[in-house]
Image (cartoon, rainbow, N blue to C red):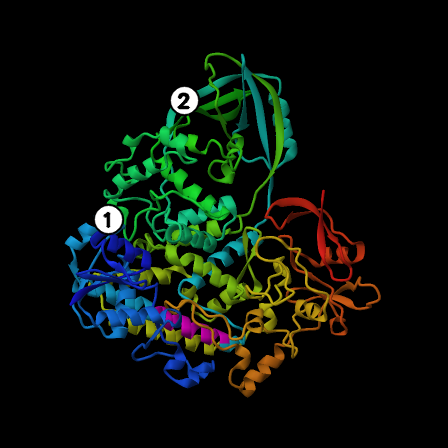
Amino acid sequence: MKTLIIAEKPDMGRNIAAAIDPKAKNHRSYLEGEQYIITWAIGHLIELAEPEAYDPKYKRWNIGDLPIIPEQFKLVPNRKTIDQLKVIGELAKRSSLLINSCDAGREGQHIFSLIQRHLKLKQPVKRLWISDLTPETIRKGFQELKDGAEYDNLTKAAKARSEADWLIGMNGSRAFTTRHNVLLSVGRVQTPVLALIYERQKTIEAFSSLKFYQVEGHFSQGDTSYKGLWQGDRLTEKDKAEALAAKVKGKPGRIASYEVKDTKEYPNRLYDLTLLQREANGKFGFSAKKTLDTAQALYEKHKVISYPRTNSNYVTEQNIPEMHKTLSSLTGTAYDEWVQGANRSLVHKGNKFVCNPAKVEDHHAILPTGRKAAGLGPDEQKLYDLIVRRFLSQFYPAAEYKMHTVITEVEAEKFKTTVKELLSLGWKVIYSDQKKDKPKGSKAKGKEEEEEEETEVSEPFSVVPSEGVHCSDAIVKEKETQPPKAFTEGTLLKAMESAGKQIEDGELRDAMKDSGLGTPATRAATIERLKKVGYIEMQGKKIGITQKGRTAIELIRGAGVELLTSPEMTGQWERRLNEISRGAASDLQFMENVKKFAAMIVDKVRAQSRADKMSFEIADPSSGTRGKGKSGTRRSGGGRDGSGGGNRQSDASGKAGGEAGGLDKGGAAGRSAATAAASPAPRGTKTGGDTPRDNASPGRRSAKSGSDAKEAAAARPAAPKFIGACPRPGCGGQIFMGRKGYGCSHYKEGCGFVIWKESYGRQLTDIQIKALIEKGRTAKLKLVLSDGSAVEGKLVLRSPETGELTVEIV
């Protein structure tokens, strides 16, 4: 009998075959040679069963049936990949030994374990544990195969993580959903991520801007001119700032101190997935999911980059020769000039900035391969270019600068100047053809309270300390303190990666230091999940929390299970799971504690007062924002996509006005759009309970009790607030604010006028809508066009018939 090798993905299986059995015959779903049969999973072939697999009553969501805590978790095949699972089962019958060649990590171990358990495979198991797929590494790994039993504790940790996520996700989501009659998704990762967005938004809304004034001195010494900022307590009174400027203007001064030091800037780290997603979001506006999907295509379809789902910025010693070969393969391409200028001696095994095996876990950093890139789409080319330039920069020396710090004194007042003089571009030559993201002439340093300007120059700069200085001018600049910026997907990914850094418990911090919230491979899915269930929405590049998202966090905290919203719980879990994987803790005890926590969540939610349905739809007027309880999917006629377009209006039909007003068929004004728009409700990921399958909308559950019915009646929405007369000729209706937009009260009579709240990257206000329907245009606003470009302009009512808007750029 033969040895069956099970890889995690097809490409990995083919790489293994090429390295150890190049003559193996390709049978499409497996390769077979004289000694080995090589096949693969396609991600997760096996899933944890849904609740109804344990009892048909769970098809209906009822809080009285909670908590759902299976004695033994059932496994079911993924219907989409069941054929491949059958292939593995048949091949196993012809095999006397199994080699687990799934990813070297907890989740790779879990994928193999699920297949083994479901198919009841009894053959002995060996483990291939490698961090990259170079032929040399693969062959060495097969020479050093481990006994599968050595990884039993890791298997226990993986199984515990999966089942624990299921328990929290399933019970938490069903409890909050049934109690509050709105689809509310809860999970160990997604909920603390939502809390990060919630806290940032609350901070922004609570921020009170403060005006202050800077005094900028203009100085000259011989042929040298420079500027400096006054050093002293923040000036909040304009007259004092102007008096200070008048005091020094035109006066002689001296150099109080002058320091010069050489400094170097080394190339940026190689990309891991999260860093690639962050930079692609910042440069191109790509969502985390788009970057992941594009990188996966570059890896699987085009084979021009290495495995992208990595959390490492480093390579191993085995990768160094491959990096040199890849550099040579780029000769004659668009990167030829930089290849010719590369210094190969800079990339070697002793360069710990590049080669650090201790910091490579499952996979090394993302690298280009030796294959020529051809036939790439525009977005694929952009991402490939990022990866290649970052790779090439490692073969270049540091950029070199002289940092000049000058303190100039005039009339006993001191001014600070920082000049960064470029000596050598070094690796930055690779980016010299690209437009700089920010002008270097005025770069903020440190906190805003420590206002300091740094000027970068390419020509020589110096002053003579012993010679006098003349203050030719002094200018007063009015400034305002700024609130924290709203998250973009890029900055949210960074926050997820570093979540837990503020946890006081040192052990918990250590448990999360290499993980944060989620993994590189799952963070994009978590963000997409938050969009899908209607917790967040995109406003151009910015992430906005909807009213439904706000209320979800407040309800979870209000129920007394605020730990669900904190990275601390993930830290506690990761610490315990790490101990289980080392054999230092019991997986059974861990699961008992999780079961108790799941039951506690249900008990707390059951005792909670039902939320007013309108709390999911209309923001607190004092908050200054208008959140919405929509899901990420609109029905037909439904506004713009998340990229900042804003000008896709509905057809002129009564349905549009009714939808904008939240008046679904049957008068379900208070239902969340996630429930109203999807039947069945959205499904979550298959790998655990963090994003459970929401397979029954709250509106179709068992009949309410008498007390619940009274609460529901008390929660009925108030009458709509009218903004003004409908501008559609001859209509006679009134415009009112609904859940998604401003529609006409005569929508049932066929008036299709609607203006979506979210238009051209803005959340429109009542005042702006009133201006549109009465004057036909708004005042000047900052807007985002469909191509993502930011402009200043007025919104104009293009069509009084439909409410279609356009932009008049001013």
Q: Nearer the viewer, mark 2 or mark 1?
A: 1
**Chief SS of the magenta region:** helix
User: Does 356 appear in magenta?
Assistant: no
What's drawn in magenta, residue-wise? Answer: 164-177
Q: Is the residue 351 above or below the residue 125 in the image? A: above
Taking depth in this image into account, of 585 and 234 the one nearest to the observer is 585
Residue 371 percent location from the top left of the image: 35, 44
Residue 151 picture location, percent across and down: 20, 62
Q: Is residue 637 visible?
A: yes
Amino acid on which disc 1 is placed = Pro
Residue drawn 33% across and 79% down? 70
Image quadrant assignment for residue 316: top left
Q: Residue furthest right?
A: 730
Mark 2 = which residue?
260
The C terminus sits in image quarter: top right
Q: Check whether the beta carbons of the residues at disc 2 and disc 1 lie within 8 A of each other.
A: no
Amino acid at the residue labelled 2? Val
Q: CA distance from mark 2 to mark 1?
A: 50 Å
Q: Quadrant of the N terminus?
A: bottom left
User: Residue 43, relative to residue 177: is it above or below?
Assistant: above
Compared with 345, 185 (above or below) is: below
Give coordinates of residue 161: x percent, y percent.
32, 66
Kind of element beneath mark 2? strand
Which sits earlier in the primary sequence, circle 2 or circle 1? 1
Q: Position of residue 578 (x, y in %)?
A: 26, 60
Residue designated by label 1: 135
Mark drawn on residue 793: none
